[in-house]
Amino acid sequence: MLDRFALSSEKLHGLLLEKDVKFLYHANTVATSRTLIQAGSLLSRHEVALKEGFQTKQFTDDKDVIHDVWDSIFVDGTDHHQFCFDSLWIYC
């Protein structure tokens, strides 16, 4: 399903350079992060499930499976948590 949106590593690298993205961010709960640290890499939710690792349930999990993004990893070019802290938002 996501194949039509796939980018080669070279195209992705070029896009990140063009947009001046210096860092990529990925958020997890502390409990899920522990699983990823023990694995030694960033894993999709599907991979964590296959390895029977712990991960915090997300309200989108069932839909993620249906929409074929359960085995995808999402990152941001902006640290949204820092924006929340800087803006003194309570609900981030």
Image: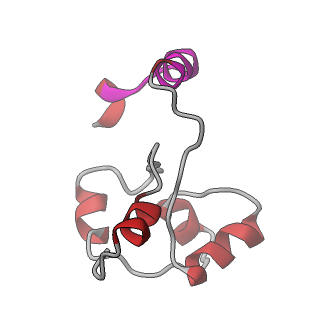
Residue 54 in view (yes/no): no
- In this figure, what is the number of numbered marks? 0
Quarter assignment of residue 83? bottom left
Quadrant of res 89: bottom left
Residue 15 covered by magenta stretch: yes
Image position of 68 (left or right of 52):
left
**Where residue 48 sits: x, y (%)?**
57, 68
Q: Which residues are magenta?
A: 5-17
Q: Measuring from the top left, give residue 42's x and y in whole percent.
A: 63, 56
Q: What is the quadrant of residue 31 in the picture?
A: bottom right
Is 90 or 25 nearer to us in this picture? Answer: 90
Q: Is residue 81 magenta?
A: no
Above or below residue 67? Residue 33 is below
**Magenta: predominant secondary structure element?**
helix
Query: Quadrant of the image for the C terminus?
Result: bottom left
Q: Quadrant of the N terminus?
A: top left
Please say which color scheme the image uses. Answer: secondary structure
Residue at 76 percent of width and 72 percent of height: 38
Image vertical order of residue 72 relative to residue 4, above or below: below
41 vs 53, left or right, is right
For this view, does 83 lie left or right of residue 34? left
Image vertical order of residue 16 relative to residue 57, above or below: above
Residue 87: percent from the left, percent from the top? 34, 67
Nearer to us in this view, 90 or 42: 90
Give the image location of residue 26, x and y in percent: 52, 57
Specify the farthest residue to the front. Answer: 87
Residue 26 can be seen in this image: yes
Q: Residue at x 61, y 77 (%)?
A: 53
Left or right relative to 69: residue 19: right
**Vertical relation: 30 (above or below) 62:** below
